[in-house]
Image: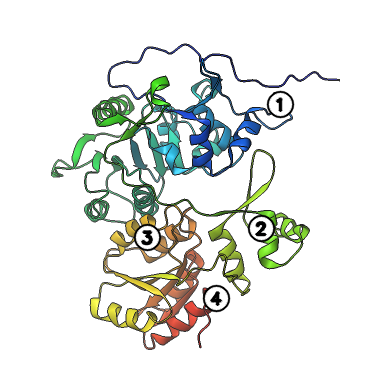
Amino acid sequence: MKNSKSARPSESPPARASIAPGAIREPIYLASQLASICDVDLKTIHNWCDRNEDPEAPAELESFRTPGGHLRFRHSAVVKFLSRWGYPIPDELLTDRPHAMVVEPDLDRRAQLVEQLGLLRPGREPGEARKGAPSPEDVAHLGLYSSGRWYVHLWGDAYAALISAGERAGAGAPMDLAVTRLPMDGIDATTWRKALLSSAETKSLRFVLIDAPKSVADEHVVGTLESGQFDALREQLDSLATELSGEVEPTPTPARRFEGSIARRERIKIPPREPIYVASQVAHIWNVDLKTVHNWVEKGDIEAFSTPGRHLRFRRRSLLHFLRRYNMAIPPEIAPVRPRVSIVDSRVDDARKLAGLLSTSFEVQVITDPTVALVDIGAQCAGANLIDAVIVTLPSSGVDGERWIQAIARHEDTRFTSVVAFSRGASDTDARRWQEAGALATVFDGDPSQIAMVLERALGVTTG
């Protein structure tokens, strides 16, 4: 029989390494802080610490004890633990260092960026880095990476990057820097930058441009490089990280005296976290047995994730998506008071007319610029918030409608948002392309009341 000893926190914290001036210190969390951040009770945190070291058993949450015997948790250990289990990383854990966004459509160039900048996916540590080129799995991964000084959001599409920038702003950790190669694929670079600077939370964003023409002059552009200058890019990033780290201050928590947990002064308030439901709650809400819920998950009908104790958990937006997909009644426990709808149309008068038509059943907002709209939609889908549907008028000047729809349909935080294309003069071929990209339906110009009917059915709204 194989021996397995119980994992116990060390009796004293490891020796503190000297920290260079301007360096970002690793945050340390109390057990009560971590319970609040992960939305679990204190006993669950202690259970996670007591997991067995047996490689076939659930991973333990690494911790140490203070001289007074209290548990403390390093930021890197918490992220590693949650990532291993597929647990959504709470936004509160992503405010300890600056955020950079890199847009690179070319797969080979992304592989070089990951390797040369030493980027790691969440939960991995430098000692776990592979020798040689990154694996195809890592290169294909889009979204969050980290280095010693930055969180890096790596995207292959400029439209998805706009949503990501908005989501980060809405989550309380706005992007500090955007790195992109010119010309951009499928969108005008100047229009793209203006969209990112359009909101109060992103107006201080800085840019590093790769292969930019000499004519580019912008107060927000802090560097221009040529392709392949990875050392120069790394130096630029490190320099900016040092500058930004001067804008941090210790958080006023008891953990401060152990390792100087930090938070950016200019971070906006983090929105409420999205409600998470256990399997028994889902079964109770729908009046079915627990086995039925597990069958739905196994068949892929409902998205779920598992806790370190292997218990199923469900996001509210995934439950709503399931009910709407199968035209099932939405229980009041998870139903929105009024579904939120964004109208994206450059014709202000037409947009307001449609908003008036929809306002009896929906909470409606109008956005006139489709590129700015992606940033705004991303911000409004952060945390517990959700835009239930978007109506976008296509074709629209300067916008690739197919890629615009794909960005919403595939992004982690907006893919539960229904997209309705409102066509002005488009062909049936265009409509098919938009629906293949992820649009729920295409409504041709002539009778806007059709949009209300489509939305009411798609979002499970009953009238009369």
- Residue 147 appears left or right of 276: left
N-terminal label among 3 and 1: 1
The CA span between labels 4 and 1 is 45 Å
Residue plotted at (47% across, 31% down):
120
The CA span between labels 4 and 2 is 21 Å
- Callout 2: helix, strand or loop? helix
In the image, residue 349 sits, relative to residue 385, either above or below, namely: below
Q: Position of residue 166 (x, y in %)?
A: 34, 52
N-terminal label among 4 and 1: 1
Q: Nearer the viewer, residue 185 or 199?
A: 199
Q: Which mark is residue 52?
A: 1
Task: State which quadrant residue 55 falls in.
Answer: top right
On the image, numbered disc 4 is attached to which residue? Answer: 460
In the image, residue 165 sits, relative to residue 114, either above or below, namely: below
**Dot 4 and dot 3 residues touching (CB under 8 Å):** no
On the image, numbered disc 3 is attached to which residue? Answer: 377
What is the crowding at mark 2: few (fewer than 14 residues within 10 Å), some, or many (at least 20)?
some
Amino acid, disc 3: Ile
Amino acid, disc 4: Gly
- Residue 370 appears left or right of 431: left
The CA span between labels 4 and 3 is 21 Å
On the image, numbered disc 2 is attached to which residue? Answer: 281
- Callout 3: helix, strand or loop? helix
